[in-house]
Amino acid sequence: MNKKNFNKRFLGLATTALLILSGLATENIAGTSVKTFDFGVGGDNPTFRSHSRSFPIPQNVAVAIRINYRTNGENAIPIIVEVEDPRNQILSLREITAEKSIKRLTINIPVSENKAHGCEKGWQVRIKSKNGQIPPARVFGDITLSFVDLPASRISVEGLANALKKGEQISRNIGSVETFRHSGIINIKASWTHNPLMQALPLKFDLIRPDGSVAKSLVGYGTNSNARPKLDFDYRIVIADTKQNGIWRLRIINSTEQEILEINPSVSFTKRCFE
């Protein structure tokens, strides 16, 4: 194993251990972001009194924050760490002291305190001098922010016709007006049947935004068939999508020469933030 792969694997194992020890690792890790900070005389930002880094965080997830910090000066420097949510509320404030040797601070934010939509504005982790002055020496380090993914939510699909004759199409609502107000990943899959004497038959599925534009399309075969590609695809709902007013729809088109029976679509949604 080369050094680059080893470091990547070590970071992943260390993050997993951090979440387990903090009681947060109940599912797969969904997001881990590492950013550096640097301020004070002799550093990359010699006129800064503080350094703030932004992290996009989904609503209703537990968060673990690990900060490695130090100074290159001979004297210890008192500093303050603030964690601020998108509503400008301080969720954590810690007073610590930076010294020449590396130190580590761990902050855990429980689900009960994460009630703000943090994908667009993001959370702020701010490191600043305690006395409000420019530190006489460089203060620097890194911030690792990790969270555990929310489980996927099953999204209702408006009642579908039991069959689609050749050349027909149907369009049905997915969820409600408020279902996709948060960015994330929508997954669509479907199974269906047809005349057993025929070979596998495909359908076309269109995911349609509230404004009528097509977000994504796929022509595929039922997940219960042996043919490829399967009708199983993801779409990233980004901030711009969440600002549309109205209901998302699913359009299903039968372009074959045969009748398709027992169409059974399944839609799920997982809240995520994308940088």
Image (cartoon, rainbow, N blue to C red):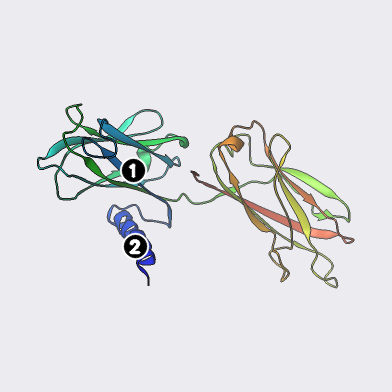
Crowding at dot 2, Cα within 10 Å, few <14 / some 14-19 / many 20+, comes out as few
Residue sitting at 30 percent across and 35 percent down? 51
Quarter occupied by the N terminus: bottom left
Mark 1 surroundings: few (<14), some (14-19) or many (≥20) residues within 10 A: some
- x and y percentages locating residue 200 in the rendered image: 79, 68
Q: Nearer the viewer, mark 2 or mark 1?
A: 2
Which of 24/104 is in front? 104
User: Residue at horizontal 64%, vertical 41%?
Assistant: 175
Q: Which residue is mark 2?
A: 7
Q: Determine whether, in the image, residue 12 is placed left or right of residue 69.
A: right
Residue 120 x/y as whole percent: 48, 35
Ranked by sequence position, the earlier of labels 2 and 1 is 2
Say which amino acid is labelled 1. Pro
Residue at the left extreme, as displayed: 75
54 up-or-down from 255: above or below: above
Q: Position of residue 152 (x, y in %)?
A: 53, 51
Residue 137 in the figure: left or right of residue 275: left
Residue drawn at the location 31% of the way across and 59% of the way down: 14
Q: Circle 1 sits on which residue? A: 110
Disc 1 on helix, strand or loop? loop
